[in-house]
Amino acid sequence: MTQTDTRNNENERAQFETSLVAEFVIDRPSYVAILDELPNTQLIVEGMTACDSETVLITFWANGPDLATLERGLENEPSIQTIEVLSGTDADQKLYQVRLSGAATTYWGWINLGGVLLGCTLDYEGKWIRMRFPNRDALVACRDYCADHGYSFALNSLQPTSSGVDSKPTGLTVAQDELLTAATNEGYFNVPRNTTMDNLADSFNISNQAASERLRRGISNILANRPPRSAERLLSQRPNE
């Protein structure tokens, strides 16, 4: 075996062993079947955690013009045990927390494979997920798990974790940085806006919900990685500063 062959084999092995960040779409889970009646409603997951071996707790923001119908649909879903409104006085945006059967979700599938949920958005079209996997085998196993449980699996993007974070202290991934830059340059944040989320999504060949979630996560990462102000400075500031 030549040195070139050796290097190629090492590179291939490293690719399979390196942690990866994947963006993919699966079918909308049955516990949010009510979204079929709410095409303008979007759920943005803040977190998922196991309550015990059989139940999962999901916290999510709901954005839409008819959250009363959403609540009725969730209350009538057999797999959902409890639903609680945690925050939100606006009629079109609220933070919810639901406790439901783990069997109604893919949670145990990806958590047992070492998956880390980085982003998740649901609407009537499906469930968009951004997740870190410890290696390519874990991603393949997750895809197979979804197929075995009746979920379609469409991979949108895949990148090594090592190349996914900007060198600047912003916490942005490359994809988030590119989308935020395009949104700024094309006037998405202008008042009035000079472009739309649909146009940005088309530019990057991704779905509207994927673009919306990527933009939101990017802004959140920037804010979370701001240099902290010292306690002395905070204490010395006047209330109107």
Image: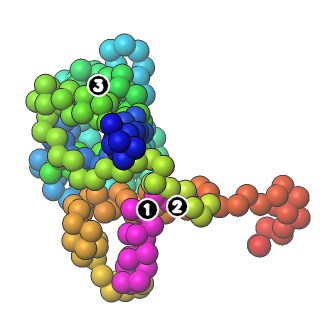
Tag 1: amino acid: Val
Vertical placement of residue 49 versus 64, above or below = above
Q: From the image, tell me which residue sits under label 3.
A: 109
Residue 32 placement (x, y as % from top left):
20, 38
Q: Which residue is drawn at 29% across and 25% down?
A: 109
Q: Please say if the residues under marks 2 and 1 sit with CB atoms less than 8 Å apart.
A: yes
**Is-magenta flag for residue 56?**
no
Q: Please say if the residues under marks 3 and 1 sit with CB atoms less than 8 Å apart.
A: no
Q: Place residue 183 in its image quadrant.
A: bottom left
The residues tagged by marks 2 and 3 sit, at their Cα atoms, a distance apart of: 30 Å
Q: Give the range drawn in magenta.
A: 172-188
Tell me the quarter of the image containing the C terminus: bottom right
**Is-magenta flag for residue 182?**
yes
Q: From the image, tell me which residue sits under label 1.
A: 174
Residue 128 placement (x, y as % from top left):
26, 48
Q: From the image, tell me which residue sits under label 2.
A: 166
Tag 3: amino acid: Gly
Vertical placement of residue 209 versus 79, above or below = below
Residue 55 placement (x, y as % from top left):
34, 19
The residue closer to the viewer here, 59 or 217, is 217
- Dominant secondary structure of the magenta stretch? helix
Q: Which residue is drawn at 21% across and 47% down?
A: 155
**Mark 3 or mark 1, earlier in chain:** 3
